[in-house]
């Protein structure tokens, strides 16, 4: 990393989010301050931020009565000075639990600020509780699982900064805890927040990070003082521990146009990210650069087809797949939402809850396709029972059912079968007759360069039907053009006006309809390619 610094007279401001951003990438911190418009934050990420606030609000009651010091100015911005003053007053008053407790430690021209999610008084001092909307199992509290420890290290960095600020403000910190959603919790009746959350003591992880804070903080402030852009190459840090909002900006600076150029190492089918960046470091970026490198069979097919502008069709492999399909034939696609908090009984945090399906079906070879659809009421009620009953009614028993990437549909059907014993036999019959339309692509029987190394339906469809506007997802309503849109908009419909709600529901129906129509067209294309 090359850094050229130019001190500024204005004091620099460091928050815990800025601190953790610097720890991931100094350039990301600089860009967030000086070029924030280059960040790309999608709607799903914004929804997760909102969910995180909801989780944080709920966790405030974990220890009984509390005082929240959040204060806003007339313009709606956080009033940090007022929050710091209120925190000092509540501590002096003897308040046991203070939420969003705010502190500022000024080191010369360096201002360091943090707000603690939950600050709890205990013998000899105060404990910090950092609330995150991530999940953990009850057993994870032991911190014996290496993968889980790696997962929470990013939070230890965050908490270490908070502890450093508070102790420099004269506050004795006696405990540091991470509060997560309990992935084992199943809602029964009203949400039990004592069961919903796991509290994990991560003092040892925080201690390791705490020793670094002083130096890291000074380095981060130095980045904020410079006016020239930080020079930092893209690498594994771009996605670890968080997806960086400046990825598109930095890849373009590196001479990569990953949206339009599909012939790079970054588009190779299932190539390890470390390996991609190794190639990049060596200057091996294009398919032409890596054509002599060791690749697996599917990657080799991808490179050869792209460089030679040819398609690869294994007719016998496709025929073997098609021979497993019988009539009547149903094409099934679910849409689901994934609420952070369990909304209904028998739900867990982040559980996938289906609210919609589309069915295209054909009774016999040479017959006409028909269509059925289900979209749950938008009143906020649990959609699963009604959907399960409709599915059992709409799909005859012992019928061949096609899905694309079938673990999702199979998983949701199995969950509903366990939830509704009276429907279990019928649902598991459907489950047992599902065939995955992804198979001939995943097994490498059909590849065309336009797929760009991806076998998702959103990549396969335009590759096989490049000029068919009827199959273009971008021609759908802007309200719903992908699964993320569907997941986000459905739970919002209950709060919309009648006209808005109707438009949203029609957009959902059109989107899900296209998903199963797409499968029909892909299946027919496979028959054509195999000469059947």
Image: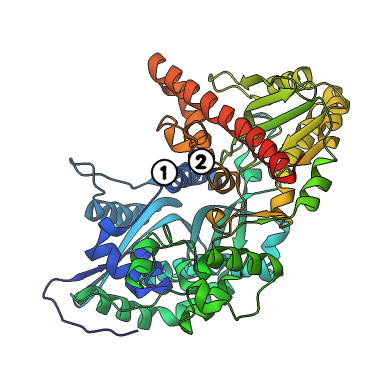
Residue 186 place in picture, x, y as percent: 70, 39
Q: Which of the 4 quarters of the picture holds residue 393?
A: top right
In this view, the residue in front, 384 or 184, is: 384
In this view, the residue in front, 333 or 290, is: 290
In this view, the residue in front, 503 or 49, is: 503
Q: Quadrant of the C terminus?
A: top right
In this view, the residue in front, 418 or 18, is: 418
Residue furthest front in the image: 531
Any mark on residue 404, and which?
A: none
Any mark on residue 43, and which?
A: 1
- Colouring used for the render: rainbow
Residue furthest top in the image: 498
Q: Are marks 2 and 1 in contact (CB under 8 Å)?
A: yes
Looking at the rendered structure, the secondary structure element under dot 1 is helix
Specify few, some or many for label 1: CA neighbours under 10 Å numbering under 14, 14-19, or 20 or more.
Answer: few
Q: Is residue 293 above or below residue 14?
A: below
Q: CA distance from mark 2 to mark 1?
A: 8 Å
* Residue at the (30%, 80%) spot, across then down: 218
Q: Is residue 247 above or below residue 43?
A: below
Q: Which residue is mark 2?
A: 484
Residue furthest left in the image: 9
Residue 522 place in picture, x, y as percent: 65, 39
Looking at the rendered structure, the secondary structure element under dot 2 is helix
Residue 8 place in picture, x, y as percent: 13, 76
* Residue at the (35%, 78%) spot, across then down: 232
Q: Is residue 190 visible?
A: no
* Residue at the (22%, 65%) spot, across then down: 34
Disc on the earlier residue, 2 or 1 = 1
């Amino acid at each position: 990393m090359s850094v050229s610094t130019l001190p500024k007279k204005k004091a620099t401001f460091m928050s815990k989010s800025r601190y953790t951003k610097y720890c991931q990438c100094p350039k990301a911190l600089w860009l967030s301050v000086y070029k924030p418009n280059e960040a790309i934050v999608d709607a799903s990420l914004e929804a997760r931020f909102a969910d995180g606030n909801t989780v944080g609000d709920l966790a405030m009651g974990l220890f009984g009565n509390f005082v929240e010091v959040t204060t806003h100015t007339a313009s709606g911005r956080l009033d940090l000075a007022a929050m710091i003053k209120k925190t000092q007053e509540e501590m002096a008053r003897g308040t046991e639990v203070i939420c969003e407790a705010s502190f500022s430690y000024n080191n010369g021209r360096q201002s360091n600020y943090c707000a603690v999610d939950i600050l709890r008084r205990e013998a000899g001092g105060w404990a910090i509780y950092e609330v995150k909307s991530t999940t953990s199992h009850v057993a994870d509290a032991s911190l014996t699982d290496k993968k889980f420890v790696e997962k929470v290290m990013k939070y230890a960095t965050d908490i270490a900064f908070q502890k450093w600020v508070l102790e420099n403000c004269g506050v004795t910190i006696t405990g540091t805890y991470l509060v997560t959603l309990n992935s084992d919790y199943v809602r029964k009746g009203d949400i039990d927040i004592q069961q919903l959350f796991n509290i994990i003591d991560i003092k040892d992880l925080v201690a390791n990070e705490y020793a670094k804070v002083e130096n890291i903080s000074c380095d981060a402030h130095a980045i904020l003082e410079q006016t020239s852009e930080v020079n930092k190459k893209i690498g594994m840090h771009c996605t670890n521990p968080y997806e960086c909002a400046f990825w598109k900006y930095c890849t373009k600076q590196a001479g990569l146009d990953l949206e339009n150029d599909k012939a790079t190492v970054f588009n190779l089918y299932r190539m390890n990210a470390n390996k991609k960046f190794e190639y990049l470091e060596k200057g091996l970026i294009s398919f032409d650069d890596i054509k002599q490198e060791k690749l697996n069979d599917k990657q080799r097919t991808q490179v050869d087809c792209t460089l030679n502008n040819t398609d690869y069709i294994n007719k016998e492999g496709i025929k073997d797949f098609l021979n497993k399909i019988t009539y009547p034939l149903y094409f099934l696609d679910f849409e689901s939402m994934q609420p952070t908090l369990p909304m209904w009984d028998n739900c867990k945090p982040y559980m996938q809850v289906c609210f919609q399906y589309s069915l295209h079906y054909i009774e016999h070879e040479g017959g006409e396709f028909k269509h059925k659809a289900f979209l749950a009421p938008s009143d906020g009620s649990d959609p699963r029972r009604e959907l399960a009953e409709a599915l059992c009614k709409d799909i005859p028993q012992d019928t061949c059912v096609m899905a694309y990437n079938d673990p999702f549909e199979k998983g949701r059907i199995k969950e509903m079968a366990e939830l509704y014993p009276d429907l279990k036999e019928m649902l598991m019959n459907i489950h047992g007759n599902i065939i995955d339309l992804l198979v001939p692509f995943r097994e490498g029987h059909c590849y065309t360069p336009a797929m760009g190394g991806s076998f998702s339906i959103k990549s396969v469809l335009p590759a096989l039907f490049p000029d068919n506007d009827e199959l273009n997802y971008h021609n759908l309503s802007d309200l719903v053009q992908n699964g993320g849109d569907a997941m986000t908009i459905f739970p919002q419909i209950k709060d919309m006006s009648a006209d808005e709600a109707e438009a949203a529901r029609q957009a959902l129906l059109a989107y899900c309809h296209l998903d199963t129509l797409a499968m029909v067209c892909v299946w027919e294309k496979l028959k054509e390619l195999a000469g059947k």
